Amino acid sequence: MATPAQPLNFVAFQYQGELPEVLKEGEVCSVRMIEDNYMRDVPLFIRGHLVKQGRRFEKFVSGEKFSPSRSSRKRLKLYVTGPPGCGKTAFSTLLAHRYAAGLTKASRNTIPAGIAATTATSSSLPAPPTTPTLATIAKEKRVLMILFRVQDPCNIIIIEGQKSKTLCNALHHGNVVALVEQVLQEATNPFDLCFLDGVRTSLDPCTALMGMLTSHTGDERKIKRIVFTTSSQFDLRAGDVQMGIDRAYEELKFDSFTQGDYKSAISNQPFLNRLLNSKPDIMKDILHFKTKGTPIPWAEQVDDEEECIEDGISEGEEKAEESNEYGTNDDAMKSFVAVAANLAVAQQYFDHKYFYAGGSARFMFEFTTFGVKDSLDTLFAKIKGDEWEEFASPTISYKAPHSVNTIMQQFKGRTATVSRYVLFEAYEKMEGKLVSAVKTAAEHSDNPALKGWAFELEQLHTIKTVFKNNSTKNSVKKKLISKEGLCFQPVENGEVSFDGKKLSNSPETEFESGTIIWCMKWNQGCFDAAFFKDEVLLTLQFTVGGDHSLKVQYISDLKNAIENSLEKEIKAFHHVAVVGGNASAFDNFRFKDPEGVGRNGAGWNLDFTVKTHKASPLVPKDIMEPGRDQFEAAHLCDTNVYTRKRAHS
């Protein structure tokens, strides 16, 4: 291959992030990353999953095996897979700098005896090179990092010990192969490790780059070991197609974030402080949530951006000039997160956002709530026809488009939709196939939220199946019943959707008594479906246990829409938690905050009473005597009542 004519132009930069000697769960590191030719510091919360993956990485660079294999060959390749937003790139960047600085087991064997090492903590930056730290006395390493991007500029970074430099030549996926090969040819010393981040095996330039790097990897070659990082899946069982038959590899499958991971991160004041400092738009969203009870509507965010453009102000300048009661500097953020009530609001805000962001930390920590929703809607529009089938696959296919991979999450190598909002969109396209796929993923996962989604989707699909049966001519009509006595019968062609503002139905459907109302994609899990019969409204929430708040303002929204549509008053309200799981989950379930204490917004000034109940899973049953048992909720086991008391003065 011909060598490019232009000389390589590298510019040095100082890595300001922490380089902890030991990765500890619950600590926070700032990771200096380069994206779009822009350098920024990203706060990285060290969750337990990262500690485990860090140990496996150290085994790989030390030459130890950690994946089962019959191959006795030396393992020079590490494949890192996981959907976007699980922290692969940020964590790989941290690992690369720690390894180069001599802060891994593979680099510490040469430390002179009797010299004590000092450590950079999660609240301080690395000591300067003049201090005899572990990094300066251990054997430093050379690392080559290649960030392969399709729409954005690519980057090449060389790390030697604690010194870093980045290539300033115009770099894109069309010329990256030639420039990387030039870097390797001009290198006087081999690289101990190479990271190729952003692998897209469906693109010829990337597969050519992988092949070229592999040809230079091995003892006495330009690269000693190599790490391939991707949001797609490699065909490792047969040997990756582009790499040839090669089973001498290790593999790290990154898990997405769980709700528990988010709760731990948000309750960590240093992490929350750094996050809000770097993302003032999220801070503004939290303050709006605190005062209004909802995030900032997307239309208002778009209007703000358009005003900035009209005034000739950049978005970054506008965010810097925004004023709020806490400001945006470090001391102000520390003051905000130091208040327990503010931390509670922040936790509620991120719990609310989880409906859209799910397991993607990128969605959770990079976007506002409705910014995430807008991004998801944009991705939905790009997914065509059979591409929705990917959501029923147990793994992320290397053939799947980026628009699909971006809205997936992964746990223990099994994939599922990234959030409940995506789940219900995919269900509209896939129905039964998706139910089976999510159930399988949940069975192989320790993620409680995913188990809840599987039960929720299974119950919704049961209702949908009964509705379709009852809408079929000459079929034996069925009802849905729980062992506690909850019973209702969807009527023929009685299907309506509610988007939070208005009811919608097909032309042949007349909204009448006995109608099923689908409410999955807008109300944050307060209820997923509703049933209307004889001036009684039944709302259904599916869960696998735990404590749940009943967001009564959403029931109020549905109440108003039905009454406006039918021009009649609803006289009774029943809200039922249908609880799955074992007997203990059913016994322990309860509604918390029954009076709405601490809630803000006029929606909590109730003008009606909601009786709350819990029930076992719904099962279909043939109706032997038509006209009877069309609706019954009077004999359920709970007696909790949401009263007319206001939630605030």
Image (spheres, rainbow, N blue to C red):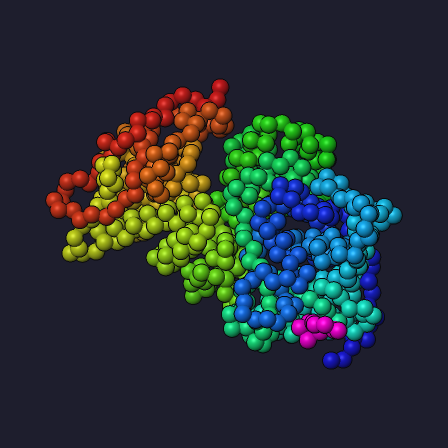
Main SS, magenta region, reads loop
Rendering coords of residue 507 (x, y %): 30, 52
Whole-percent x and y of residue 637? Answer: 28, 31
Is 476 placed above or below 350 here?
A: below
Instruction: For residue 42, say whether it is visible.
Output: yes
- Span shown in magenta: 213-221
Residue 472: x and y in percent read: 21, 56
Instruction: Confirm whether the magenta stretch covers residue 254.
Output: no
- Is residue 233 toward the left or the right of residue 61 in the image? left
Rendered position, 574 above or below 480: above
Q: Is residue 493 above or below residue 486?
A: below
- The answer to which image quadrant residue 574 occupies is top left
Q: Quadrant of residue 440?
A: bottom left
Q: Residue at x 72, y 48 (%)?
A: 21
- Residue for point 29% across, 35% down: 537
> Residue extending furthest top?
649
Q: Measuring 59% from the left and 51% from the top, which residue is drawn there? A: 52
* Residue for point 62% across, 43% down: 25
Is residue 217 placed above or below 425 in the rendered structure? below
Q: Is residue 341 left or right of residue 608?
A: right
Query: Seen in the image, is 189 located left or right of residue 610?
Result: right
